Image (cartoon, rainbow, N blue to C red):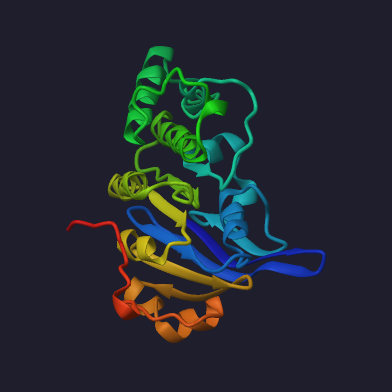
């Protein structure tokens, strides 16, 4: 659905993304991982159309993303950024409703509110509808924006067979175990509904548990891509992260380690 073809983004002579090839397809969850400054967020911004490559191309079903009208782009992809600044005293319902009330979606007011209330409950914020957004914790604010993105995917009337994408930049960064599971479980559900899902994660364990494909980036380049067992390798991870990494190894001296349980 969405493709990066040798996509490059350069600023002041520095390549933040360097000839990246990537594809996200309906029905699959792709996770981009890598150290700070690897180019993960920049690549997501390229795929969303927020910025354009200085070389190479971003394609939506074969069309250059620059040629896609703003209205269609709003219908075809929803984005949750790593951080969003919103200083107005909107309620949680009003913020999440922004996803359903995009001009051109054509949804009735009553239906928009019902859809938005459902999305708020989906992200674990039932009962927060009238809470003031600016008074929430960072993790709660992030989940409000995920609810907004879910509304943006559900609200528009689509031509038959039209696919859409959900793009999430570090959606679990401020969340505890329980809410990480809620958010990434919803990402998997969106894939089952036929959406293409891209999620940037720092937690390699979560990427392994929830993603169909992992894309490992370093210094703007895609170093490896594939299923977790082909990408999360000791030598490769140690090189990319610049520290010793040992996968599937119990810590020494009986130090406990804790992972959320991922059921079958």
Q: Is residue 261 left or right of residue 121?
A: left
Q: Position of residue 142 (x, y in %)?
A: 49, 39
- 49 or 36: which is nearer to us? 36
Q: Residue at point 61% right, 48% down? A: 49
| Extreme residue in the right direction | 12
- Can residue 249 be seen from the camera position used here? no
Q: Residue at point 29% right, 75% down? A: 254
| Extreme residue in the top direction | 110
Q: Position of residue 174 (x, y in %)?
A: 48, 47
- Can residue 229 be seen from the camera position used here? yes
Q: Position of residue 98 (x, y in %)?
A: 52, 26
Q: Residue at point 53% right, 83% down? A: 239
Q: Quadrant of residue 198?
A: bottom left
| Extreme residue in the left direction | 264
Q: Position of residue 18 (x, y in %)?
A: 65, 71
Q: Quadrant of the C terminus?
A: bottom left
- 260 or 110: which is nearer to us? 260
Q: Is residue 150 above or below residue 256?
A: above
Q: Quadrant of the N terminus?
A: bottom left
Q: Quadrant of residue 235?
A: bottom left
Q: Residue at point 54% right, 76% down? A: 241
- 142 or 226: which is nearer to us? 142
| Extreme residue in the front direction | 253
């Amino acid at each position: 659905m969405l493709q990066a073809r040798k996509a490059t983004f350069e600023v002041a002579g520095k390549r933040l993304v360097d000839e990246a090839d990537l594809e996200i397809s309906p029905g699959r969850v792709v996770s981009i991982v890598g150290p700070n400054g690897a180019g993960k967020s920049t690549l997501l911004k390229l795929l969303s159309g927020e910025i354009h490559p200085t070389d190479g191309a971003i394609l939506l079903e074969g069309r250059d993303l620059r040629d896609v009208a703003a209205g269609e782009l709003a219908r075809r992809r929803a984005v949750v950024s790593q951080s969003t600044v919103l200083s107005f005293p909107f309620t949680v319902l009003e913020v999440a409703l922004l996803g359903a009330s995009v001009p051109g979606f054509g949804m009735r007011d009553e239906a928009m509110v019902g859809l938005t209330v459902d999305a708020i409950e989906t992200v674990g914020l039932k009962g927060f509808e009238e809470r003031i957004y600016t008074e929430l914790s960072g993790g709660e604010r992030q989940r409000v924006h995920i609810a907004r993105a879910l509304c943006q995917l559900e609200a528009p009337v689509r031509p038959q067979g039209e696919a859409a994408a959900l793009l999430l930049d570090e959606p679990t960064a401020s969340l505890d175990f329980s809410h990480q599971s809620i958010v990434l479980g919803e990402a998997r559900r969106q894939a089952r509904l036929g959406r293409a899902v891209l999620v940037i994660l720092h937690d390699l364990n979560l990427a392994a548990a929830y993603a169909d494909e992992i894309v490992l980036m370093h210094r703007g380049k895609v170093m490896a891509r594939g299923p977790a067992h082909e990408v999360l390798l000791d030598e490769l991870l140690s090189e990319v992260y610049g520290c010793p990494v040992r996968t599937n190894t119990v810590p020494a001296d009986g130090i406990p380690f804790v992972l959320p349980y991922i059921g079958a």
